Image (cartoon, helix red, strand yellow):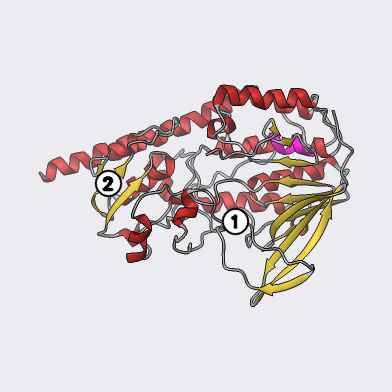
């Protein structure tokens, strides 16, 4: 089952998934137009100060950041819109929590540059990288082969409509005083936007009133910009996954202790465990895109493909496999199974894993998924995919063990100091 080859392709997003998608498309050497739209000012993200949280009910019901009103006649300009949830989750000393091997594309070696902080925490062979190294890596992918000229930054895709055989994208670029609006048409669209841009905050009675009485007192982990603003303050962290663990431990030398960690009712991340919450100074909806075959191809219309709509999949590396499959599909060179088989794949996965986050989780079936995608992509004149290598998973898991060992060491050191002072 194949579609007619596309000639004009739009890519939404210029992060790691978008960057590798651009290369996969370009290497097919069959597209007349490849256009990339990134709503931020540069590739790979940056560190910016987030606005205070106010839409607590909408955040709890996952209805925040609703679509904006589209002007009737385009092109046009309108009064400048208020900022939306576009800020990244980076803070000045943030490092990756995944081993570099899992973030490395097969043809593009990941930088070996390390930071003093990471070496202190994990030793001279630390596999974790500062966020600026990651951003430079992504930028370098788009800086080669003339790809930079394909990207329109500060440009938001506000809507994508299928009009006859074409995808019509409604685009907005903010100016100093006004926003500029226009449309462009394409044969196919690659969605490489990532996920979890809009924070989720559970419906906690009184939380909105507390934030209103003390502006800036309630933050989502996405808005954390380092420990300094919390010096001497009493802090509660809510959650049990990776961000909650990192932030909780980061606060113990700055905030008033103990830092209160609320993990009851939350499951610890299966890779990282709950070791961070054992520090002596710590007192302890359906969110997927339906209808995607192999998490990549929208089965209702194969001219719409996704790269990066998965979880726990060896981070950047899985983007490469998905990008090559997406490019082959749009080039008319991949052969997908009949629609009934695509539907059965999704139906059986829902029956086994449910219709929530587990559906999008690839771990622990890495090899099975990577090889299935590689088989669907097949061979072609473009970017080739090598056979899956078990050492990628070993490095991925070893990186998690190193972080857990760091938490255990910090906990023991802090306990020893506490006992000595007593």
Give me the disc on residue 260.
2
Q: What's drawn in magenta, residue-wise?
A: 321-327
Q: Nearer the viewer, mark 2 or mark 1?
A: 1
| Relative to 98, residue 193 above or below | below
- Describe residue 371's horizontal placement relative to residue 261 as left or right: right
Secondary structure type for disc 2: strand
Residue 16 in percent (x, y) is at: 64, 46
- Residue 161 placement (x, y as % from top left): 77, 51
Q: The C terminus lies in which quarter of the figure?
A: top left
Residue 400: x and y in percent read 45, 33
On the rendered image, what quadrant is the N terminus found in?
top right
The image position of residue 36, as x and y in percent, is 74, 54
Viewed as shown, does residue 237 lie left or right of 114? left
Does 243 lie within the magenta span? Answer: no
- Depth check: 271 or 93 in front? 271
Numbered label tally = 2
Camera-side residue of 121 and 58: 58
Q: Are marks 2 and 1 in contact (CB under 8 Å)?
A: no
When the figure is inspected, residue 159 is found, relative to residue 309, above or below; the finding is: below
For disc 1, the marked residue is 66
CA–CA distance in space, label 2 to label 1: 33 Å
Mark closest to the chain's N terminus, 2 or 1: 1
- Label 2: how many Cα within 10 Å (few below 14, some 14–19, many 20+): some
Examine the rendering and report whether any part of residue 387 can be seen. Answer: no
- Residue 355 visible within the image: yes
Circle 1 crowding by C-alpha within 10 Å: few under 14, some 14–19, many from 20: few
What main secondary structure does the magenta stretch of the protein show?
Answer: helix
Reply above or below: 195 against 266.
below
For the point 60% across and 42% down, the residue is: 110
Q: Secondary structure at mark 1?
A: loop
């Amino acid at each position: 089952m194949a579609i007619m080859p596309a000639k004009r392709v739009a890519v939404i997003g210029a992060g790691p998934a978008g960057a590798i998608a651009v290369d996969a498309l370009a290497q097919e050497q069959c597209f007349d137009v490849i256009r990339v739209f990134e709503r931020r000012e540069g590739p790979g993200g940056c560190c910016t100060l987030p606005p205070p949280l106010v839409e607590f009910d909408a955040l709890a019901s996952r209805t925040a950041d609703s679509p904006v009103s589209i002007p009737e006649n385009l092109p046009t300009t309108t009064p400048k819109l208020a900022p939306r949830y576009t800020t990244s989750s980076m803070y000045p000393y943030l490092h990756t929590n995944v081993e570099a091997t899992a973030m490395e594309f097969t043809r593009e070696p990941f930088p070996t540059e390390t930071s003093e902080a990471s070496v202190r925490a994990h030793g001279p062979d630390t596999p974790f990288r500062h966020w600026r190294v990651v951003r430079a890596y992504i930028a370098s992918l788009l800086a080669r082969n003339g790809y930079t000229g394909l990207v329109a930054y500060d440009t938001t895709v506000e809507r994508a409509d299928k009009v006859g055989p074409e995808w019509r994208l409604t685009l907005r670029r903010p100016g100093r005083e006004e926003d500029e609006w226009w449309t462009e048409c394409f044969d196919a669209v690659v969605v490489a936007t990532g996920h979890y841009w809009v924070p989720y905050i559970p419906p906690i009675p009184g939380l909105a009133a507390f934030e209103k009485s003390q502006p800036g007192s309630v933050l989502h982990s996405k808005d954390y910009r380092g420990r300094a603003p919390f010096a001497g303050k009493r802090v509660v962290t809510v959650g049990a996954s990776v961000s909650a663990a990192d932030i909780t431990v980061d606060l113990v030398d700055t905030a008033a202790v103990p830092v209160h960690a609320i993990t009851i009712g939350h499951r610890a991340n299966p890779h990282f465990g709950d070791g961070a919450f054992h520090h002596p100074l710590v007192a302890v909806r359906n969110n997927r895109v339906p209808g995607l075959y192999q998490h990549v191809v929208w089965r209702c219309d194969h001219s719409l493909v996704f790269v990066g709509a998965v979880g726990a999949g060896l981070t950047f590396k899985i983007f490469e496999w998905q990008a090559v499959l997406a490019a082959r599909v749009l080039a008319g060179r991949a052969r997908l199974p009949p629609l009934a088989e695509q539907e059965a794949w999704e139906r059986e996965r829902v029956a086994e894993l449910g219709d929530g986050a587990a559906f999008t989780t690839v771990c622990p079936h890495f090899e099975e998924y990577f090889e299935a995608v590689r088989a669907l992509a097949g061979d072609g004149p473009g970017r080739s995919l090598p056979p899956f290598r078990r050492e990628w998973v070993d490095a991925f898991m070893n990186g998690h063990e190193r972080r857990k060992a760091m938490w255990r060491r910090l906990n023991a050191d802090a306990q020893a100091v506490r006992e000595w002072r007593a």
